Image (spheres, rainbow, N blue to C red):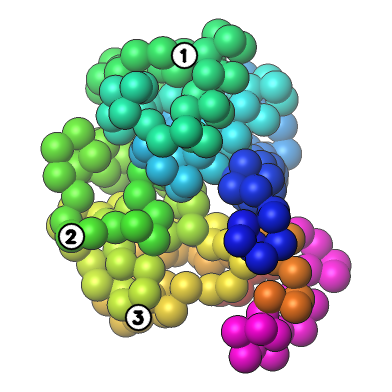
Amino acid sequence: MVQDYRILLIQMMENAGRNLAHLARTRFLAGDPRGRAVAVMAGGGGNGGGALVAARRLATWGAAVTVVLAQEPEAMTEVPAHQRHVLARMGVAGAEALLAPDALGPVDLVIDGLIGYSLRGAPSGRTAELIAWANGCGAPVLALDVPSGIDAATGTVFAPAITATATMTLALPKAGLRAPAAAPLVGELYLADISVPPSLYAGLGLAVEPLFFRDDIVRIT
């Protein structure tokens, strides 16, 4: 998309985050996010950037959003860092410094944007600590693209890995999400539009019919 169509990463990230926020609102927040406590866990790459877009939108809709970064702010890559700067200017909690998740108190929803398809081996350090916290906090977890700790291509489940209530994957379902070991951690599976041109699929030899002609988000399982 970037190389052939000049569709920028920030555009795809905005589409992903908008759909993630919408699914959070309709599936987990009863259509009204006002005053609801949402913890958004964000890594330093594209997955984290999409989660931060969702954090911005939920905050503008009245949710009490807290961002929980997986690394120091200066360690984030350029496009997610831009999203973090926006949240910091908005005064969203956690956008400027690392927070201990145990200090958050009860939350209504956790959004997992820690690791996407770039996973390389088992999560460690603060990322592993955040996964353990999310799994034990008692709130539903909505994962972006793939639950952190699961290999999107193979379905290998590392320890620790997010046990999601629902996963919203992007463009096309990732093969690993249907693997027997991964499926119980994926939860409900949704597919969201990030506006991939049909000709891109055709150029890859894929026959993909219009998937989002009725809605930007389609439930698969």
Q: Position of residue 93 (x, y in %)?
A: 46, 13
From the image, tell me which residue sits under label 1. 93
- Residue 14 to residue 67: above or below: below
In the image, residue 166 lies at what x, y percent? 49, 57
Front residue of 26/8: it is 8
Give the side of residue 87 with respect to residue 107, left or right: right
Q: Kindly state the secondary structure of the residue where label 1 is placed.
A: loop
Q: In the picture, which quadrant includes the N terminus? A: bottom right
- As drawn, the label of residue 179 is 3
Asked if residue 183 shows in the view, the reply is: no
Q: Residues within 10 Å of mark 1 (few under 14, many from 20)?
A: some
Q: Position of residue 135 (x, y in %)?
A: 28, 45
Q: Which residue occupies the foreground of this view, 81 or 57? A: 81
Residue toward you, 218 or 73: 73
Give the left or right position of residue 135, taking residue 1 as reference: left
Residue 66 sits above or below residue 1 on the image: above
Task: Determine the residue positioned at 70% across, 22% down.
Answer: 60
Is 92 placed above or below 195 here? Answer: above
Task: Specify the label residue 13 is tagged with.
Answer: none
Q: Nearer the viewer, mark 2 or mark 3?
A: 2
Q: CA distance from mark 1 to mark 2?
A: 30 Å
Disc 2 residue type (three-letter): Gly
- Asked if the residue at tag 3 contacts the one at tag 2, i.e. Cβ–Cβ closer than 8 Å, the answer is no
Q: Earlier in the sequence, mark 3 or mark 1?
A: 1
- Asked which quadrant contains residue 221, the reply is bottom right
Residue located beneath label 2 in the image: 121
Q: Quadrant of residue 43?
A: top left
Alpha carbon distance from label 2 to label 3: 17 Å
Q: Indicate which disc, 1 or 2, sits on the residue closer to the N terminus.
A: 1
